[in-house]
């Protein structure tokens, strides 16, 4: 998964060490993606080792990644390969978000549930979330785009672009 994320960030066909270094320098939110993938890797360990690894992760990695990047991605999320967060700062994924491959996120987004009992949010493949958007719906279909500053309270169909507050489809 991390390989696909690196390829999405570098926009290259193959990985080159120089491009990875440039990406890490230009996109601090990249460290949040790496930290998330590391935490998901820890979850695959056998139970006693997993508990120690996750304690290490939550005490020493997660708080500093959140502080440094301003990006919060809990390990209860399931996000496919190709995750890119282009700008850092105030980007929060609520617990339990399910996202497909090639999710593109800009700064200042919040993905949350409308209520505590609401279903988790499911994002399809190739979804793009604009800056400062608020996602409060249950699903966003494949290939959908959410415009900057949109407040999405209703489900978004595949291939649809929504903008505004409340979010409405572009015609």
Image: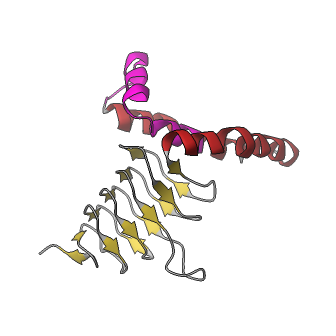
Question: Residue 36: horizontal and vertical position, in percent?
Answer: 58, 45
The residue depicted at 46 percent of the width and 68 percent of the height is 122
Residue 108, placed above or below residue 144:
above
Question: Residue 22: horizontal and vertical position, in percent?
Answer: 37, 23
The residue depicted at 26 percent of the width and 61 percent of the height is 148
Q: Is residue 170 left or right of residue 66?
A: left
Residue farthest to the top, as pictured: 18
- Predominant SS of the magenta segment: helix
Residue 57, placed above or below residue 163:
above
Name the colouring of the figure: secondary structure
- Count the marks: 0
Question: Is 62 or 103 nearer to us in this picture?
Answer: 62
Residue 115, placed above or below residue 94:
below
Q: Based on the picture, tell me whether residue 64 belongs to the magenta stretch.
A: no
Residue farthest to the left, as pictured: 171
Question: Is 121 or 86 nearer to us in this picture?
Answer: 86
Is residue 89 in view? yes
Question: Residue 156: horizontal and vertical position, in percent?
Answer: 32, 74
Residue farthest to the front, as pictured: 67
The residue depicted at 39 percent of the width and 34 percent of the height is 27
Q: Is residue 37 left or right of residue 151?
A: right
Query: Which quadrant is home to the C terminus?
Result: bottom left
Question: Residue 134: horizontal and vertical position, in percent?
Answer: 38, 68
Query: In which quarter of the view is residue 56 placed?
Result: top right
Query: In which quarter of the view is residue 125 placed?
Result: bottom left
Question: Is 104 or 88 nearer to us in this picture?
Answer: 88
| Bounds of the magenta segment | 12-36
Q: Based on the picture, tell me whether residue 30 belongs to the magenta stretch.
A: yes
Residue 60, placed above or below residue 129:
above
Is residue 1 in view? no
């Amino acid at each position: 998964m991390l390989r696909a994320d690196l390829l999405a960030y570098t926009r290259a066909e193959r990985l080159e060490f120089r491009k990875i270094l440039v990406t890490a320098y230009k996109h601090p939110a990249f460290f949040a993606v790496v930290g998330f993938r590391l935490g998901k890797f820890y979850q695959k360990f056998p139970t006693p080792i997993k508990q120690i690894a996750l304690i290490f992760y939550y005490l020493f990695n997660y708080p500093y990644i959140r502080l440094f990047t301003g990006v919060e991605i809990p390990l209860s999320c399931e996000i496919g390969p190709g995750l890119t967060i282009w700008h850092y700062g105030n980007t929060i994924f609520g617990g339990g978000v399910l996202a497909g491959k090639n999710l593109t996120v800009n700064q200042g987004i919040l993905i949350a549930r409308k209520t505590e009992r609401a279903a988790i949010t499911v994002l399809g493949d190739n979804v793009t979330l604009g800056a400062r958007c608020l996602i409060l719906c249950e699903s966003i279909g494949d290939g959908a785009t959410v415009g900057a500053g949109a407040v999405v309270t209703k489900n978004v169909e595949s291939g649809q672009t929504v903008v505004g507050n409340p979010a409405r489809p572009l015609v």
